[in-house]
Image: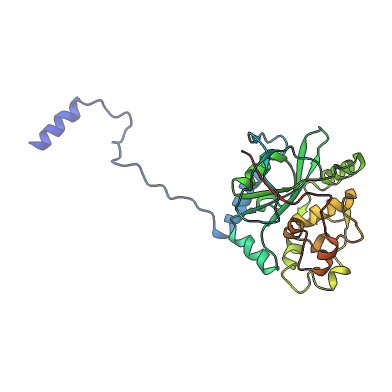
Amino acid sequence: MSFAVVALCALGAEPYPYPDSAPLAPPLVAERRLPSVLRPLARMRANVADLAVPGAGKPAPAGSFLWQPSYCEDQLLRGPARPYDLQPGDIIMSADGSRFWKLMHNLAGTSHPTHSMIAFRKPDGTIGILEGGPHDTLKCRVLDALPHMASYEAEGRVWVRARAVPLTEEQSARLTEFALATDERRFALGRLAQQLTVFRTRGPVRTALVGKPHGLLRGSYFCSELVAEACAYAGLLDPRTTRPSATYPRDLFMDASPNPWLNKHLKLAPMWDPPARWTSR
């Protein structure tokens, strides 16, 4: 009886528009996965495509605020906050939740923050950011400032060491020249890895002798090296005592360093304010 009912229903039903009967379930398609060795490369390409490069159309956040300054890299927001417009020469630092980079910095004898970048005035008059290896990519890039800072805020904490003394026109022009000239240069991955070896430029004695500025002569830079080179090139830091390839983001943050040479000579205050948390709201 049941077979007869099924047959009658089938005769009265609208015919299936394809020659074969419909499958009971959609066919299973095996997920195509990249080999494990290629997955970091795929993530890196995705990061490159998502950067706030000029013309990318990344939306700027609704606001820009600095909280009260403090030489603390904790989670606290120290009020009150004030609206803040980024200025050329401001040094921006961030810390995300990456355990890998935290471990690498710990092995090198440092800690958070793990990223650093510098603000400059672009030829169109807007403020841009120069950073080496933004979001784990392998280039130095010029980026739209606020959208890029917001991308780091979404991952963790962002601080600004604002210029207490505005740049002169000449200083600002030289900073812009350096930023545009180093855009698209390679991230110094090999020289960064060297910081974990006995051949690094950072040491109780050797930093006084090596790690000096190279200006535009280098083909690659890591993030804090790029910031220190930019400051030396623009005349914001003394090139005779600046040691870019021995400088880490935390040295720029703290105005203090376990390295004796940097602890004596790398003092951003009073030309820069102490670090203050930045938020977009």
In the rendering, at what x and y percent does residue 12 appear? 19, 25
- In this view, 56 is above or below 253: above
Which residue does the image show at 64% across and 60% down from the upper left? 101
Q: Quadrant of the C terminus?
A: top right
* Res 76 seen here: yes
- From this view, report whether residue 104 is shown above or below residue 273: below
Farthest residue to the left: give it: 1
Toward the viewer: 15 or 153? Answer: 153
Q: Residue at horizontal 30%, vertical 36%?
A: 22
Can you see residue 51? no
Disc tally is: 0
Q: Position of residue 221 (x, y in %)?
A: 79, 56
Left or right of 225: which side holds 55?
A: left
- Say which quarter of the image contains residue 172: top right
| Residue drawn at 66 percent across, 33 percent down | 57
Q: Nearer the viewer, residue 13 or 35?
A: 35
Query: From the viewer's perspective, is 275 left or right of 19?
Result: right
